[in-house]
Structure formats: C-alpha cells, structure tokens
Amino acid sequence: QVQLVESGGGLVQAGGSLRLSCAASGRSFSSDAMSWFRQAPGKEREFVARISWSGYSTNYADSAKGRFTISRDNRKNTVYLQMNSLKPEDTGVYYCAAHELGYWGQGTQVTVSS
C-alpha cells in the first residue's frame, strides 16, 4: 500500500519557522516529481512548491518564494518543506503529493498566530 505521511506541522507565531516532512512508503518516488499543496479554511487547495525527481529543479508559488524551501532525500524516500518567516495567511492543512501520479498524503495542520 502506497502511503505519503506528512509530519512537522503545529502552532507557531508569526515570523517563526516549521519544517514539514513527507515520508513515502509502499513504492519509491525517487524518479518522480513531488509537491506540496495547502488548503486554508474555506479556500480551495493551492500549489505551494514542487521539486523534480533529482532535486535540481524547484518551483514555488509566489506566496512561498523567498520564504519556503522544498528539498528531498531520495535515499529516505522523503520530501521536506522548510518554512521560514511564517505569516498568519500561511495557516492551513499542508499536503504532500506525487500529484501527477495521483498520490496524496492526509495532510498536516499548520497554524500561524499573529
């Protein structure tokens, strides 16, 4: 059974940092692009960041540029999202995905207080 399990979410004050992890099991994603999405209360899910299979290419939503960094460790089948300078508008459930393949995690809650 293929699973993507996110961790690292929590409550943080504005300006703080969190590091999200996404551990994959059941198959290797070392040849696949991986992404992070988020969904704020009452809003649609939105793209946050993407990383190529090699890790050499990354893409970010404008809201994440300069503050978030996506990375991966293919030996551990794990993807990370380092989030710095967090803002209240970053609050939401963060999902890890190999979305081009249709695999999604169940999400981890991030709450940023002002």
Image (tube, rainbow, N blue to C red):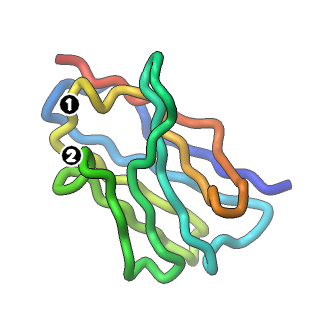
Is 49 displayed left or right of 5 in the figure?
Answer: left
Q: Position of residue 28 (x, y in %)?
A: 71, 72
Q: Nearer the viewer, residue 112 or 38?
A: 38
Image marks 1 and 2: residues in contact by CB distance under 8 Å: no
Residue closer to the observer: 30 or 59: 59
How far apart are labels 1 and 2 at the CA level? Answer: 9 Å
Total tally of numbered discs in the picture:
2
Q: Secondary structure at mark 1?
A: loop
Q: Position of residue 47 (x, y in %)?
A: 44, 48
Image quadrant in which you'd find residue 91: top left
Identify the element where label 2 is drawn: loop
What label does residue 84 carry, if any?
A: 2
Percent across and percent down for residue 17 are 23, 41
Amino acid carrying label 2: it is Asn
- Image point (66%, 51%), residue name: 4
Residue at 22%, 55% in the rendered image: 65
The image shows residue 54, relative to residue 102, as above or below, that is below
Residue at x-position 54% and y-position 63%: 34
Residue 12 placement, left or right of 92: left
At label 1, counting other C-alpha atoms closer than 10 Å, the crowd grade (few under 14, some 14-19, many 20 or more) is some
Q: Mark 1 against mark 2, which lies toward the viewer? A: 1
- Against 3, residue 18 (above or below) is above
Residue 50 marker: none
Q: Amino acid at mark 1?
A: Lys
Judged from this view, the residue extending furthest toward the right is: 1
Q: Quadrant of the C terminus?
A: top left
Image side of residue 83 versus residue 23, left or right = left
Task: Determine whether 43 is above or below 106 in the image.
Answer: above
Q: Which residue is mark 1?
A: 87
At 25% across and 45% down in the image, what residue appears? Answer: 63
**Percent position (x, y) of residue 22?**
54, 53
